Amino acid sequence: MIEFRHAGALVWLVVAVAPVVIYLLLRRRKREVPWGASYLLRLTLATRRKASVWKQMVVLAVRVLVLVLAASLVARPYRQNPRPRSLAPRMPERPVHRVVLVDDSLSMSVSVGADSRLNRLRSALGALLLSERPGDTITLIRLVPERPRPGASGRRLLAAPFTTFAGRLSRREVREIVSGISLREGVIDLEGPLIAALSRFAATPGAERELYVLSDFPREIGTTLGRLEWFRSSRGGICVVPVNMSAAGESLRSSVSVRDVRIGSDLLLAGVPTLVYVDVQNFSDVKATTRLRVELGGQVAAEQVVSLQPDERKRVALPVVFSRAGVEALEVRADGELIVLDAGLARCVEVRHGPAVWLYADEADPREELPMTESEFLVRAIACEPRLLGLEPIGVRELAMPIPAEVDVVLLAGPRVITPKMGEYLTSFVRRGGGLVVAMSPRVDIAFYNDNLGPLLPAHLIGPARKEVDPQSYDSARQEPADGASELFAEFATDRSGELEEVRFYNHVLLEDADRLEGVVFRLTNGDPLLVHRACGRGHVYLWTSSIGASWSSLAVRQSFIPLIVRMINAAMAGRGFPRNLRPGESFVCEWTGKGTAALVGPDGQQRELQPVRGPEKPFVIASGLAERGLYELRDATRRVGAFAVIGQFAEPDLRTLDDDGQKALAATLGHSIFEDWPAAVRALGPSDSAPELGLVVLLVICALYLFETWFVRYL
């Protein structure tokens, strides 16, 4: 179907009848004059008249057609195509400046079959770039800014917060630009790019202004839409085109994300089972079933199938055993992740064969009725499981001198007396990274502990809660929420492996300001602290207010007794290693056991050199400025020397687009409803090849008819 931009110009079609009028007028002016020789001439002309009439009609028709086409050329005809083949919208008549906000977040890797959100974005962006004309300008702005990476200079879209292209681009240049869109982890920010877009528009005041927002509009931005109200009054004459890059029906697919992973300590024991706590959430509108996997060195160490209702969040405990000593990196994944790129969470731990533990307790007193001392009881109990822990009983003499660096933890099993020298050396030991576990017993003299261990104890000791032990009077234990350093103990508050609530505590030592005390791991049912943690220097102190043996509790007859002792010692010796799970911005420090310069390999595969720093005894490596979440490896020229992780929640767990209310709020702010996909936006704006200009074709036809008319008249 042919339509005209300036239909009023078709009035000039009346000029097309001019050749016919002229022909008729000239024909009527002829008058026959008879004369003698005209008879023979009329006979000759009569034989040719029939042949000349059709030639005159051809010439007349050609001249009329030329005038008709000339009038049409003034009206600027075009062809209306209801099914456009092109993905580019119609270009304005004046030069245009287009600003395209490009979503380069990881959620764009979600795919349906072979088609992904990123592919749809690249197709739309490529069509816009190819439609640029001389005099036009297009600016690309990322919604997730990224610093330039080494070796990425050829990717022009990633080289700056925005990139501007002027004039026509070749297909090779367009392919280079769209292929340079690499995805990164982060939540899109509309406010900053919108400000940048208005700034770019100000640089071309004489051009038409079009703003394209190509994104999947994740639900995380719903809470930030209130900050965009200023754009409603600032957009002026800008044509805003928001387009959703997510396919229809994607919100009905199950999407499970691992939100967090906790181990409890960066320092664990080989062969000792521990629980890895995984927070997993269903970010979809349908019920989901997923398989959680914990991988060690590429091998599955634990897995579990989890069913989740829509938007349900669970904490799942997966038992893991680290069988060998060294630095181990584990990754937790959920089957069926919609994000194509790596979205697993990594954690690093240092595993040791077994700590060197000194056990100090009073020797047996023949005047007491107790069958054995706390020290003897522990040694016999641990001897049943020698692979877990080896205790070395010591006396006063060992603690009355500096504690050797080879010792990891000192366990005070309720001795009566702590001397000033013991307190001095224990304080120095803990501050240098040693671990201290302090337990109570009926023999403890509170005054010695307060006076000599005051700088180490989490709280001031008051005295026993009960003067005498009554088998009918007891308390049980419950876990105190959130201390950060106490995740290792969470399993002992569950029926699966802890059953700590079933233990009877007949007596314990009271602490000062117990209600406001920080670092409480377990409390008794009456509210008094049972296990309290305190960090001192690089070391850690754990205070157990009841007895570790059978004096004041029934813990010794429970299956959780030995694992709990191992956990306390394991947590106390955390200062003997270096933190290997860091928050973004923290620095990593460790001893350097490799050869030469250290190479730090980040989660993105990029490598940078670190120069070891000479310490008092050994060289150290310091890595700072670490912001990207994931697993990092330290290497020398031949092997991996160590590893650590920068932890943090995944930025885009919810892969669904904005709900109806969110889309309405965003549409009101931007001044245009969100198109469901790119073809819908092109149809609404008018496809570029649905209105191709036919003026050149018409002009060529006119020239061809003129040449034909000239040839026809001259030669025929």
Image: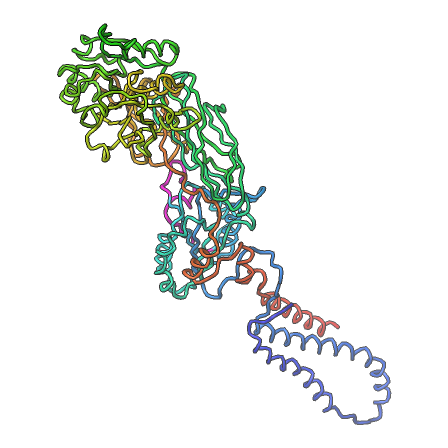
Q: Quadrant of the N terminus?
A: bottom right
Q: Which residues fall within the magenta stretch?
A: 146-167
Closer-to-camera residue (163/217): 217
Q: Quadrant of the C terminus?
A: bottom right
The answer to whether 655 is drawn above or below residue 688 in the figure is above
Q: Position of residue 633 (x, y in %)?
A: 38, 26
Quadrant hosting residue 691: bottom right
Quadrant hosting residue 79: bottom right
Would you say 502 lies left or right of 66 here? Answer: left
Q: Where is residue 595 in the image (x, y as percent from the top left)?
A: 33, 17
Closer-to-camera residue (423/193): 423
Would you say 510 lies left or right of 209 here? Answer: left
Would you say 713 lies left or right of 130 here? Answer: right
Q: Is the magenta stretch mostly helix, strand or loop?
A: loop
Residue appearing at x 30%, y 9% in the figure = 371
Q: How many labels does the image show?
A: 0
Residue 429 counted in the magenta span? no
Quadrant hosting residue 5: bottom right
Q: Where is residue 700 in the image (x, y as percent from the top left)?
A: 62, 66
Asked whether residue 12 is in view, the answer is: yes
Closer-to-camera residue (404/683): 404
Residue appearing at x 68%, y 72% in the figure = 710
